[in-house]
Image: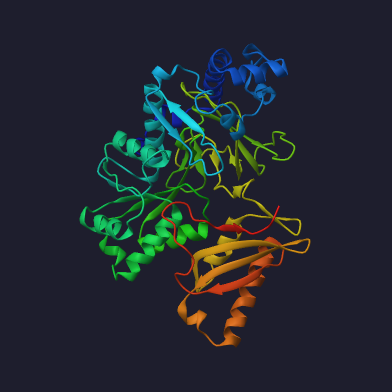
């Protein structure tokens, strides 16, 4: 890859030795700041008998306590800030659907750093200053839209701040303004592809060339479908508001994992049950420590996302570790008859089956003492209205394929096209009817 396709070649291609020295210096500075300025961390460190000076190597990171979303809720709204509120120039928060939202803040330097981190993965995906970027994430307290917005402007691309929803207008703008890059959730990209097809628009007549999709787990099969139906290169990126928003990691054109910005974040993989740090290549829960943030540093934040890290250098020339697509979340994981099940595993099966639409819903219920899983999938009209014998054969085939991947039997239910609710943001994949 040419240097003009790497936004920050000095950092993105640095040697492991240089990187680890930089990480240690930034970690030590961050620990001193939070110990001095954040009562929550000072209490956590004191309870463990730890002071920042005890961390003299990166391996000492495992001595430090974890931070969880509960810590953020208990310190709502500004208790985790490491700077006075007068130095905070931006405030975002989560949706707060499970209680009080988690509130995050940014200084001017934080916003500049954030913009550059997003510019990195956008450049890696192929976005340049010649592009027109249509952002179909919802603007507001959610970090996604603003992160991609300022990253695009940092690159010099033109931004269309469409926000979420209003799909007919999204497509009109896409055509009339000649958008070349699309930013949204992968499930919304499928919704737009459905509408484009319904309106009889040939994707080849659009100017789109790249999609930057995040906000929810999605499979390689869904990537292939999006790329084929929209005639684009679909790339994945990862972030979460508690850590910074989008900009933690993103794919390059090689698409063999998302490059983590390791000069800004230290990544660990832990066993979610024992909390032990796992060796490289292990599958487990991603834990992130911020080492460049001023307003809202996070020490060993448990993301609840399940993935694995690859430390081998990429063909693109970047040396940062790469994280695989998230397989799901520890809090989204379903346990059916003792087997761990992630929605993304089922999606991988369904998208690969001819006749299945990429819209599905998992309904979990309890019958007696047993949990049962019903997989509702939209199918094309010719299958839904097919004769019973053929429909039964199709159901059996789908059930067997899911069973072979999960190792547990499920009930498959075919539903009519467009009967599963569409969502402009994250798709609601799981309906849990179990009574606690």
x and y percentages locating residue 340 in the rendered image: 70, 54
Residue 344 versus residue 267 in the image, above or below: below
**In-image side of 386 versus 166 (left or right):** right
Residue 255 versus residue 90 in the image, above or below: below
Seen from the viewer's position, the closer of residues 171 and 55 is 171
Q: In which quarter of the image is residue 59?
A: top right
Q: Residue at x 51, y 80 (%)?
A: 383
Q: Quadrant of residue 392?
A: bottom right
**In-image side of 421 versus 361 (left or right):** left
Seen from the viewer's position, the closer of residues 432 and 159 is 432
x and y percentages locating residue 179 in the rendered image: 27, 52
State the count of labels.
0
x and y percentages locating residue 45 in the rendered image: 66, 18
User: What quarter of the picture does the N terminus occupy?
Assistant: top left
Q: Residue at x 55, y 27 (%)?
A: 298
x and y percentages locating residue 296 in the rendered image: 49, 25
Q: Which residue is drawn at 59% across and 58% down?
A: 431
């Amino acid at each position: 890859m040419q240097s003009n396709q790497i936004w920050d070649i000095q950092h993105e291609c640095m040697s492991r030795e240089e990187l680890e020295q930089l990480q240690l210096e930034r970690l030590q500075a961050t620990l001193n700041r939070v110990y001095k300025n954040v009562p929550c961390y000072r209490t956590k460190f004191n309870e463990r008998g730890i002071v920042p000076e005890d961390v003299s190597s990166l391996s000492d990171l495992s001595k430090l306590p974890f931070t969880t979303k509960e810590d953020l809720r208990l310190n709502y709204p500004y208790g985790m800030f490491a700077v006075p509120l007068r130095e905070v120039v931006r405030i975002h928060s989560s949706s707060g659907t499970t209680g009080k939202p988690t509130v995050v803040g940014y200084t001017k330097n934080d916003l500049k750093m954030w913009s550059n981190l997003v510019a990195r993965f956008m450049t890696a995906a192929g976005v340049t200053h010649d592009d027109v970027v249509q952002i179909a994430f919802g603007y507001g307290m959610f970090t996604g839209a603003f992160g991609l917005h300022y990253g695009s402007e940092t690159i010099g691309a033109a931004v269309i701040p469409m926000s979420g929803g209003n799909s007919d207008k999204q497509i009109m703008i896409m055509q009339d303004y000649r958008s070349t890059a699309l930013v949204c959730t992968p499930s919304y990209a499928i919704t737009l592809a459905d509408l484009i097809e319904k309106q009889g628009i040939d994707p080849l007549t659009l100017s789109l060339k790249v999609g930057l999709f995040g906000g929810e787990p999605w499979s390689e099969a869904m990537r292939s479908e999006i790329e084929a139906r929209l005639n684009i290169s679909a790339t994945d990126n990862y972030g979460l508001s508690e850590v910074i928003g989008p900009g933690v990691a993103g794919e390059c054109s090689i698409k063999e994992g998302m490059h983590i910005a390791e000069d800004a974040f230290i990544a660990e993989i832990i066993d979610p049950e024992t909390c032990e740090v796992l060796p490289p290549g292990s599958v487990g829960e991603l834990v992130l420590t911020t080492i460049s943030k001023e307003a809202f540093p996070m020490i060993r934040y448990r993301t609840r996302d399940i993935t694995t890290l690859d430390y081998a250098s990429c063909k693109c020339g970047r040396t940062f570790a790469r994280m695989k697509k998230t397989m799901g979340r520890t809090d989204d994981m379903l346990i059916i008859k003792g087997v761990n099940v992630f929605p993304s595993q089922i999606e991988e099966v369904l998208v690969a089956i001819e006749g299945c639409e990429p819209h599905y819903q998992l309904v979990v219920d309890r019958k007696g003492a047993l949990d049962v899983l019903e997989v509702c999938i939209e199918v094309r009209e010719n299958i839904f209205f097919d004769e019973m014998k053929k429909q039964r054969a199709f159901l059996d085939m789908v059930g067997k394929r899911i069973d072979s991947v999960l190792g547990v039997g499920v009930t498959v239910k075919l539903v009519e096209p467009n009967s599963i609710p569409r969502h402009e943001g994250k798709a609601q994949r799981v309906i849990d009817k179990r009574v606690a």
